[in-house]
Amino acid sequence: MQITVAVKIAPIDVSNGKFLGKTNLGDGYTRWDWQVQYPINSYGVALNIGAYTQFSDRLHDLPLDFYVLPENLARARIQFAQAKPMLEIFERYFGEYPFARDGYKLIEVPYAGMEHQSAVAYGNGFANGYLARDFTGVGISLRFDFIIIHESAHEWFGNAVSAADVSDMWIHEGWATYLESLYVEQRFGKEAALKYVNGVKSRVKNEEPIITQRGIHRSPTQDMYFKGALFLNTLRSVVDDDARWEGLLRDFYQRFKYQSIMTEDVVQFFNAQLGRNFTPIFDQYLRRAALPTLELAFVEPGTLAYRWKADERDFAMPVRIGAQGEWQLIEPATAWKTMRTSLTKDDVEVATDLYYVKVTKR
Ligand SMILES: [Zn+2]
């Protein structure tokens, strides 16, 4: 995409892609030319017209350019220092920043933020959290700038890997929210990341499916962010092998970068890579409103019956149960199974920080 913007009063336009140059048009206007050298979503295009001042950095060969109003320069130099380690973390997980030839830009705007491709909009007040609030409420959010991390995560998921229909936008928002937890994991450790991703549970409504009807341009509800991320955390627990999970994340991104895909592509990829049919799990979490419920029934002393109650008839997912932090893996399906156990109704726990599920005991 070639972006050409003539501005009269404001001294500068910052748009997506690579800056080609400016031309004085001689009538009071200056023309700013930008070239986007990759596929781009139309909603990812931006005109940022203002009296910006600029400072720069580099991450290996990648130019990092920061545009803020002059009065915010000092605060921005401190706050925007978070951009480089964030990019390093996402590059380590997924591979090179997707729009290397266009560079990475962070641009002050008068709204909270937006994932404009290679020209990320920033309006988070040069403070950590989301508008300086701990929006997950579990004490992790204030350790980083939500807008820098979340909107930049969209460079990988949203801008490089895009959903072909707004119905499947969890591919943008669920993944970007999950990437926040990966960032937290690298910066602050696995425990903090688990706490962070589980902190969003209170925001999930489970009232309608994350994926909406396709073809009618109907946006999903907010569940696509938080339930989407919790679903990916659940899938990771199902895979139950961090090295393998990280390999899958990277391969998934590399397989679909610069493409528009649908959830079917995601499901097919994971099924093929894992050699197992996980379609009922994807369908239950993404195409059904309700969470799967693990039903535990102590039918007689020492005997536990268990099953999944789910809308998907073939829903089957391993899950960890135990007591006092001693976990064992069981493989419930929708038909009852029984096992001998020393667990009791009072002490049995389910590892609900690893699997986003409901539990009933009787
Ligand atoms: Zn987002």
Image (spheres, rainbow, N blue to C red):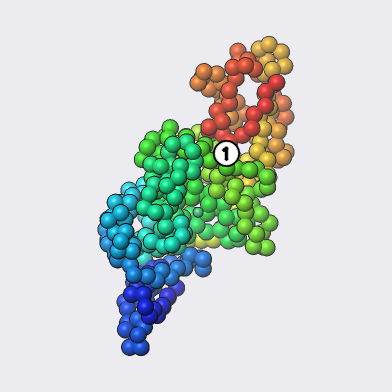
In the image, residue 69 sits, relative to residue 321, either above or below, namely: below
Exactly how many numbered labels are in the figure?
A: 1
Give 349 or 122, whichever is nearer the viewer.
122
The residue under the point 43% across, 38% down is: 140
Give how far across and how far down residue 3 sits, in percent.
42, 75
Badge 1 residue CB within 8 Å of ligand 1: no
Left/right placement of residue 177 relative to residue 298 reads left
Give 16 or 343, whichever is nearer the viewer.
16
The residue under the point 50% across, 21% down is: 325
Badge 1 marks a residue whose secondary structure is helix
Report the amino acid beneath label 1. Answer: Ser
Give how far across and how far down residue 243 sits, in percent.
43, 38
The residue under the point 66% across, 54% down is: 212
Quadrant of the rendering where the N terminus is positioned: bottom left
Quadrant of the rendering where the C terminus is positioned: top right
Give how far across and how far down residue 231 sits, in percent.
56, 41
Which residue appears farthest toward the bottom when viewing the image? 27
In the image, residue 288 sits, relative to residue 347, either above or below, namely: below
Asked whether the viewer can see residue 65, the reply is no
Q: What residue is shown with label 1?
A: 202
The residue under the point 33% across, 51% down is: 79
Left/right placement of residue 176 relative to residue 317 reads left
Give how far across and how far down residue 203 sits, in percent.
57, 42
Quadrant of res 188: top left
Left/right placement of residue 206 relative to residue 24 reads right
Which residue appears farthest toward the front when viewing the image? 71
Give 270 or 149, whichever is nearer the viewer.
149
Asked whether the viewer can see residue 138, the reply is yes
User: How many residues crowd mark 1 within 10 Å: few (<14), some (14–19), many (20+)?
Assistant: few
Give 202 or 334, whichever is nearer the viewer.
202
